[in-house]
Image (cartoon, rainbow, N blue to C red):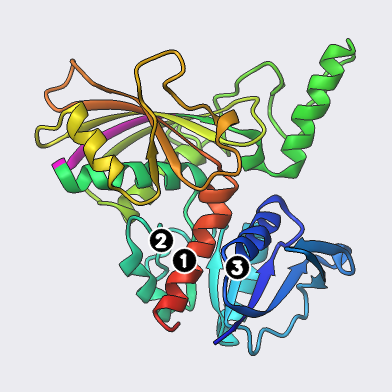
Amino acid sequence: MGYKVAVVGATGNVGHEILSILHERGFPADEVFALASERSAGKEVSFGDSDLKVQSLEGFDFRGIDIVLSSPGAKVSAQFAPIAAAAGAIVIDNTSHFRMEPDVPLVVPEVNPQDVALHTKRGIIANPNCSTIQMVVALKPLHDLAKIKRVVVSTYQSVSGAGKEAMDELFNQTRHFYMNDKVEHETFPKQISFNVIPQIDVFMDDGMTKEEWKMVVETNKILDPDIQVCANCVRVPVFIGHAEMVNVEFENDISRADALRTWKKAPGVSVIDTETDMGFVTPAEIQGEDDVFISRVREDSTLENGLNFWCVSDNLRKGAALNAVQIAELLVKGGL
């Protein structure tokens, strides 16, 4: 049986990736509809070897649509996701709007696939934040093995996580820098080229940024509410690919060898760790890849049961589009 699928935000970075991944993985869709804002209506987007004409989201009739893969921005999702769900579609939403609502499941297929079944309450499934997704994929096998008490994570997040305008800003600032022109900034609070910015999203009352808060509460909702999480999120001048340095404290004994054996059997994880100058992975090497790549694994001598590791992932794929398509595949496997 083929399904009718609508991709909302089809002209954005994540929308393009969703369309590409649906085709790559042979998703069983009889029809795919590309939806975006009124100003994008009539444009064409690639879907495999063919092109889809973009339709206006406003006024689109979702009756008969089985699955909506949505990444148009939180305000737009807040308005249109309930409309699509009321029409009978199951909405997989990439924005932050629904993630922490108690009756909306927050799903990473390698971590909590069983929660997909909870979509019946609202007709909506939330896709987690990109930085959270890659971390919980890495943490889940270790948590099953030795039970995690506390996580301290520092992220190094690429500009694509902030959208196309952010990528353009990095490109233009770099070009102006080499031309000895004045470097302007609009998307970011400070210059991003040849710089790092310890702020992602807005600041909250306790001094955390909202991105840091997301990593805390989403990890608790997806993996375990008892895990303490300290997150420090930094934007770096990289186009695609997020990196994280993660320190984990466990309740039970765990060695580096235990972790490596466990990860090598885990879905969605690739381990490249040879303790040499070339034995680790960087964001530039994993663009277009689906897995979370782990390297620089070592025991923490300052903790009784502590471990450090470095993980990188393509934030547009596993951090957004791929995770959403994998959720859709779980729905198909379960007969919707």
The answer to whether residue 227 shows anywhere in this view is no
Q: Nearer the viewer, residue 103 or 112?
A: 112
Marks 3 and 1, the one that precedes in the sequence: 3
Residue topped by disc 1: 327
User: Spatial distance from mark 2 to mark 3, Cα to Cα?
Assistant: 14 Å
For the residues labelled 2 and 1, say whether their Cβ atoms are less than 8 Å apart: yes
Identified at 60% across, 33% down, the residue is 158
What label sits on residue 107 in the rendered view? 2
Identified at 90% across, 13% down, the residue is 179
User: Spatial distance from mark 3 to mark 1, Cα to Cα?
Assistant: 10 Å
Marks 2 and 3, the one that precedes in the sequence: 3
- Element type at mark 3: strand
| Magenta region, residue range | 146-154
The part of the image, by quadrant, that contains residue 292 is top left
* Image x and y of residue 108, in percent: 40, 57
Residue topped by disc 3: 69
Residue 102 vs residue 283: left or right?
Answer: left
The label nearer to you, 2 versus 1, is 1
Neighbours of disc 2 within 10 Å: few (<14), some (14-19), many (20+) = many
Q: Can you say which quadrant of the picture contains the N terminus?
A: bottom right
* Image x and y of residue 78, in percent: 60, 67
Residue 176 vs residue 6: left or right?
Answer: right
Please check the rendered image and state whether residue 235 is part of the magenta-colored stretch, yes or no. no
Q: Amino acid at mark 3?
A: Leu
Q: Nearer the viewer, residue 219 or 47?
A: 47
Marks 2 and 1, the one that precedes in the sequence: 2
